[in-house]
Amino acid sequence: MSGPEQLTGTDELRTAIEACGYFPALVFDSVMLSLGEEAMVSYVVQHEPTITPDGIHRHVTVAVLTPTRLIINHTDDADATAGFGAQAASTSEVVGLRRIASVSLSRIVNEPSRYRPDQVAVQEALLTVAWGFASRIDLEPATCDNPDCDADHGLTGQLVGDDLVLRMSSDADGTEGVGQLVRFGLALQRSTNIS
């Protein structure tokens, strides 16, 4: 009698995508098309439903690290075209690891005075990856110190890199989801030769 089957990395990825319940065949196929024959080092899957007055809009992000590339797939609900039912848009972006400018991983823990690496679970994790492709300008009206001033002082703002930001909490994504994001972030940091 043989033991339990060992899951491969792609089997584990498929299982994580299926757990989101959002068009898993489409999401998995989109990621695999970009992955091709290259080996997978690590992955993370994040499901972000958003509730608006129009209804629930779903979004799944899958990030896959290979020895040479970072693959990011976003799958979203799309506006239905006349004559069709529900539609989804699945977009994959591939970034060479040499292009990555920074990888920031923040871990938030409760009761840091009691922190022990093997005993305390991370409550929340934030991964930010920048390679200079996408950025946004955050603008706001400029003001002066005079509370009675009604002059137009123009705008002030900052240019913010916004290539990939993933945030997970144990309350929303489970302890394992946060752990997966931390493992992925660490693998990406260790694979990226930032100079």
Image (cartoon, grey):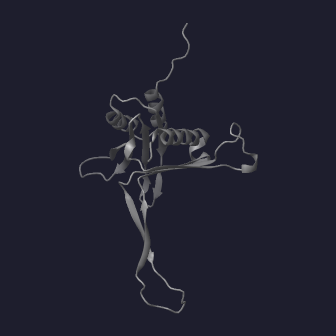
Residue 161 in the image: state x and y as whole percent: 42, 58
Q: Is residue 111 visible?
A: no
| Residue at the image point whose x is 39% and y is 63% from the top | 136
Residue 173 in the image: state x and y as whole percent: 56, 44
Query: Which sits in the foreground, 25 or 39?
Result: 39
The residue at the far left in this view is: 83
The residue at the far top in this view is: 1
The residue at the far right in this view is: 114
Decide: is 51 above or below 159: above
Q: Is residue 45 visible?
A: yes
> In which quadrant of the rendered image does the N terminus lie?
top right
| Residue at the image point whose x is 46% and y is 24% from the top | 8
| Residue at the image point whose x is 45% and y is 27% from the top | 11
- In this rendering, would 97 be left or right of 48? left
Query: Which sits in the foreground, 102 or 146?
Result: 102
Residue 46 in the image: state x and y as whole percent: 48, 44
Query: Across the whole image, how many numbered discs are drawn on residues?
Result: 0
- In this rendering, would 56 be left or right of 117? left
Quarter of the image where one finds residue 75: top left
